[in-house]
Image (tube, rainbow, N blue to C red):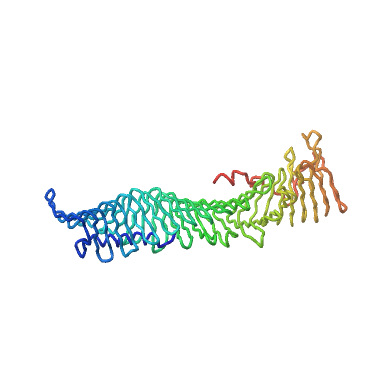
Amino acid sequence: MNSRYSKIIFASLAALFHAFLSYGQGVEIKHTDVFRSVVENGEAINKFIGHVKLKREDAVVTCDSAFQYLDRENSLWLTGNVRIVQADTLFLDCDHVYFDGKEDFLKANGNAKLRDPNTRISSDNLYYSRKNRLVYYNDGGIIEMEGFTLKSKEAYYYLNRSYIHFKDSVLGEGKEETIRGDSMDYYSREKKVVFLGPTEVLSNKGNLYTTGGEYFLKEKIAFLTKRSSIEDSSFYIEGDTLYYEQLTKDGYGNGQIRLFSKKDDILLLGDAFRNREGGDYSKVWGKPVVRWVNGPDSLWIKADTLEKSKLDTVDILKCYKNVSIFRADMQGICDSLTYNRLDSNLNMYHDPVLWTGTNQMSSDTITAFMVGGKLDKISLVRQAFIINVDTLRNYNQIKGRNMDARFDTLGLSKVDISGNGESIYFVLSEEENSVVGMNRVWCSNMIMDFKHNKLRDIHFLVKPDAKFVPPHELAEPEKVLRGFSWRESEKPRKEYFTKPW
């Protein structure tokens, strides 16, 4: 909406009405077919009938008939083809006009149209109160302004305060945007719209939905104070409070934030967010959650702070403090995490633990590699430890400096141990209802083959040191390797990510 349109149309109407509310002070009777001065019902009236033309300074009135009510402080009634022209640039056409001299009030009714070179306002009834400095209509009107049309049931322009209040079924349509709402205020000096009820602003740059807030028309900046949403072709943002610069896509918000990146299929949830660099950088904090769709499953991540940024053309997700992750095929915890959208690598730092099926994995750093959206390999760097629970709740354990755990469609398929390898593995009966014994192996480097998450074979790359312990000789201290810690109670569940939302 052009910032000056509404101000011009109402201010011009006010100036025109001012001219004739002072009728009798410098008003010329230029023409009338018939003049009569009568008293009707005890009231003195001057009647001008037929081709009436009145002039005051640069304003001219023509109509079929005019009646001057002398006892009403020169109130004036104009009727029939009424036209008021000011300076040959401002025109008011209607069926009737009534000037109330006592109340300083004017009413133009019957297909009333007010226009100047740039604007046009139409309503069955237009009103002006000089005492209150108020121009308004209250039974439907249309304002047309150089490519922009605004319709509403009611409109009130407060001249002293330079703002217009639009009420009931407000619709503004232009080349760049469409505004629909229940009620709103327009401030001409600040060139802003204040939303006072459910409103939508639609444009080719994006859409805005709100129940309260402000929108600066020239700068295309929105500050929304009630539950609102903003959407364009690439993202959707929803929150209790939102600030958004439409031209740069920078913004921030608070209160149950939902930020969805359409091109990446990423959903960010949290208490607050910051968006900048044209939408390439997003930060969410306050119990934030991210859902990142990858292949056949979604990756859920929760942390104290989440950041999504772009490095060259690659999207990077960074998560800080109290990180938890969930996928159907893996769950994990750590202190910080990065996720690379391009190669689907998930890097976990500072006391990370990752669960896959019945396996628990831990090390100083864990990297999970995805191929085609499926888990392909997990690398454990420094102090690597894998624990597998069998059907009798025995803890099979693998320990080493570094490990690579590979997966297939059946689950864990192979583990490569590099440096300081140790393992404990419980041998079960064929029925898997009793323990036959426990294998304890020391070997610097080895490869362990699995099927259905069960050990099938071990390949020793250097000479091993091994022993087999029968069940009756098993003592509790011998059942675990140094550094053993079963942390299943910390394993995230899906409801932990979705329940608050």
Residue 257 falls left or right of residue 415: left
Residue 180 pos. (x, y %): 44, 50
Q: Nearer the viewer, residue 127 or 413?
A: 127
**Eyeballing the image, is 335 above or below 356?**
below
Q: Is residue 464 left or right of residue 242?
A: right
The quarter of the rendered structure image containing the N terminus is: bottom left
Which residue is depicted at the point 74% across and 54% down? 380
Closest to the observer, 322 or 422: 322
Q: Position of residue 264 (x, y in %)?
A: 63, 53
Count of residue discs: 0
The extreme right residue here reads 463
Picture quadrant of residue 277 = bottom right
Instruction: State the residue lying farthest toward the front.
Output: 33
Horizontal and vertical percent position of residue 105: 25, 56
Instruction: Identify which residue is drawn at 29% across, 61% down.
Output: 16
| Picture coordinates of residue 153, whole percent (x, y) | 37, 49
In terms of depth relative to the viewer, which is nearer, 335 or 258? 258
In the rendered image, which quarter is residue 340 located in? Answer: bottom right
Q: Is residue 230 left or right of 92 when viewed as pictured?
A: right
Front-most of 347 and 96?
96
Q: Is residue 168 left or right of residue 134?
A: right
- At 59% from the left and 43% from the top, the residue drawn is 495
